[in-house]
DNA sequence: GGAGATTAAATTGTACACAATTGCTTTGTG
DNA sequence: CACAAAGCAATTGTGTACAATTTAATCTCC
């Protein structure tokens, strides 16, 4: 318990805890910061961009998944407390509409407006520009992605 | 430009963009959620825990770095707009004190109280419990850490 | 030594996150 | 049909993040 060995293990765990968890948190914010100047041009925040990525994807998909707040929340792992105000802001910008579903009044259905679809064109350069901004070889990015993927799977599998 | 090859590359970049950036963001939030029940027991939020980890580390370090808001901000990559209210809450909980530095009145010096030091004991089980909660082999965690480390280095190097 | 630049923290304003609660709607059961 | 249970979005309240501005102290250079 108080042996040097035990202490060394504790130190290692503490170090790993600090490194893994702080750095994940810092890296996530750093990536958001990289996106900011690109998304500013589109008048979007990073979470708003993620929402639109999903809606654009669904817009081209057959059969189209029904784009409700709930479905969006599952996809992005966000709840209505976060999404409702965010979607209201996108609606205020004229990018989408929110309507109670006629068949189930509990649900709210989302639909891109023409402006929302048009924005996809302007956003099409974002991924490439962002990947360039990281200044990392593609191979490195693919490896990081796979590792984070693995981590996220493990964290959400349960 | 409009060739099939170019389109395939675009799709791949778009996919990578979506996967890497969304998943990093999601993984960071998922980890925070894993910490929550453990930190609730200590009355701390995740960013507050990170602040205390740094202060505890500095408390045992010789020579001690001078624990100012600025130094803390550099370590955690957070600015005074985030740290000031957070530190005020930790001060209100009696875990630390904030005092204008006598030698330079622009700076605010932070000092752990006895309660702040005592909390380190109670927090000592957090890293191990957290690592268990991930349900991932240690080797996997070490690999993720190294990859995220590499990413963060690249993002903050410039 | 004093005007202007620089620095550190605090403040202001906007936008997430998320737990907990509320208000409807629908569903399931007797 | 009635009514309890479950489902979905919205709301409320707290706590970050972060850009931009403000305030106060220190530094620099002449």
Image: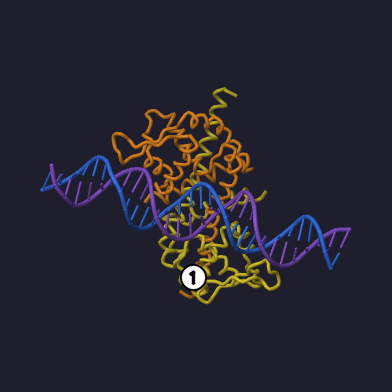
Chain colours: A orange, B yellow, C blue, D purple
Of residues D2 and A6, the one nearer the viewer is D2
Horizontal placement of A109 versus B85: left or right?
A: left
Of residues C5 and B15, the one nearer the viewer is C5
Callout 1 secondary element? loop
Of residues D26 and A46, the one nearer the viewer is D26
Name the residue at 57% across, 40% down. A39
Where is residue A144? Give x, y as percent. 54, 46
Vertical arrangement, residue B8 with respect to residue A35, above or below? above
Where is residue C19? Give x, y as percent. 38, 57
Name the residue at 33% across, 35% down. A101
Residue A2 visible from this viewpoint: yes
Horizontal placement of D5 versus D25: left or right?
A: left
Q: Number of marks in the image?
A: 1
Where is residue A60? Give x, y as percent. 44, 29
Where is residue B113? Give x, y as percent. 54, 75
Residue A147 visible from this viewpoint: no
Name the residue at 39% across, 46% down. A80
Q: Mark 1 lies on which chain?
A: B
Disc 1 marks which residue? B93
């Amino acid at each position: 318990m108080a042996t040097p060995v035990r202490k060394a293990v504790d130190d290692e765990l503490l170090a790993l805890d600090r490194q893994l968890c702080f750095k994940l948190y810092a890296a996530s914010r750093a990536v958001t910061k990289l996106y900011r100047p690109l998304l500013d041009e589109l008048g979007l925040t990073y979470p708003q961009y993620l929402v639109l990525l999903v809606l654009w994807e669904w817009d081209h998909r057959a059969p189209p998944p029904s784009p409700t707040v709930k479905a969006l929340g599952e996809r992005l792992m966000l709840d209505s407390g976060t999404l409702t105000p965010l979607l209201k802001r996108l609606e205020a910008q004229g990018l989408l509409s929110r309507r109670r579903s006629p068949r189930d009044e509990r649900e709210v259905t989302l639909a891109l407006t023409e402006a929302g679809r048009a924005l996809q064109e302007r956003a099409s350069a974002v991924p490439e520009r962002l990947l360039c901004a990281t200044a990392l070889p593609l191979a490195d990015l693919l490896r990081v992605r796979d590792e984070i993927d693995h981590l996220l799977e493990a964290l959400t599998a349960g």
